[in-house]
């Protein structure tokens, strides 16, 4: 199947049913008012990279496997003597997903990765920033099926920020709940 004709499952779900539900709930008058997913930013902090540069390469390879996109290194902005950290040293990696890759990642996150998290009781419904963006953290990246458990030398935590075009927390939470984010009550 060529990439030009392929549409992710969640994107067609959004177009076919989620938009209508949101218009019904929030009484939008203009179709451009309906919130949608904008981007997903995945960040891995690798503090051990200060002493061992192989760790950052390992984390970047794992993040590339999870996201399907090459991550960029994040560098420290200031020096901190207590952590033996100098300005400009690599301290992690991040990737920004948009369009089809973003929808595919959100689909894998909600249907495969989150159910595999140990002792998972649902996502915190208060982790919104007031402008329609949602932030969450995972303690280990092994919950993604792309990561082979036997080939991993160390587990990494990751921050996942889902940016939407919603104006309020309530609109963003309704949008993400429709996409299958398992918020606890």
Image (cartoon, rainbow, N blue to C red):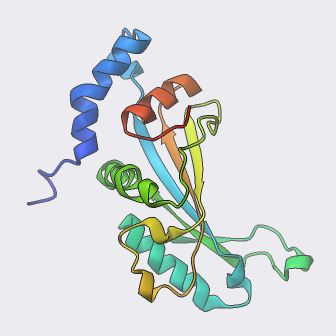
Identity of the residue drawn at 58% across and 73% down = 156
Left or right position of 145 against 49: left
The percent position of residue 16, horizontal first and vertical second, equals 21, 29
Q: In the rendered view, would you say 59 is above or below 29?
A: below
Give the number of callouts.
0
Give the x, y percent position of residue 98: 38, 51
- Residue 26 as seen in the image, left or right of residue 122: left
Residue 104 occupies quadrant = bottom left
Q: Which quadrant of the figure has residue 43?
A: bottom right
Q: Which residue is farthest front? A: 119
The single residue placed furthest to the right in the displayed view is 82
Q: Is residue 170 left or right of residue 179?
A: right
Viewer-proximal residue among 180 and 168: 180
Residue 61 sits above or below residue 41 on the image: below
Residue 91 in percent (x, y) is at 68, 75
Picture quadrant where residue 18 is located:
top left
> Quarter holding the C terminus?
top right
Against 168, residue 61 (above or below) is: below
Residue 126 visible in the displayed image: yes
Relative image position of residue 96 (x, y in whole percent): 47, 57
Quarter the N terminus occupies: bottom left
Q: Is residue 70 visible to the viewer in this orientation of the structure?
A: no
Q: Residue at x 23, y 48 (%)?
A: 8
């Amino acid at each position: 199947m060529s990439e030009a004709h392929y549409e992710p499952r969640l994107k067609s779900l959004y177009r076919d049913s989620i938009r209508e539900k949101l218009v019904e709930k929030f009484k939008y008058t203009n179709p451009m008012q309906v919130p949608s997913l904008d981007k997903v930013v995945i960040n891995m902090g690798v503090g051990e990279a200060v002493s061992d540069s192989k760790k950052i390469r390992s984390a970047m390879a794992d993040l590339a496997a999870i996201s399907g996109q090459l991550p960029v290194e994040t560098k420290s902005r200031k020096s901190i003597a207590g952590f033996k950290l100098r300005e400009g040293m690599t301290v992690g990696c991040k990737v920004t997903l948009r369009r089809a890759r973003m929808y595919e990642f959100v689909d894998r996150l909600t249907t495969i990765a989150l159910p595999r998290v140990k002792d998972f009781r649902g996502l915190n419904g208060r982790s919104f920033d007031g402008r329609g963006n949602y932030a969450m953290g995972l303690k280990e990246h092994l919950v993604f099926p792309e990561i082979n458990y036997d080939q991993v030398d160390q587990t990494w935590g990751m921050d996942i920020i889902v940016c939407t075009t919603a104006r309020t927390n309530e609109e963003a939470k309704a949008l993400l709940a429709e996409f299958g984010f398992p918020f606890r009550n």
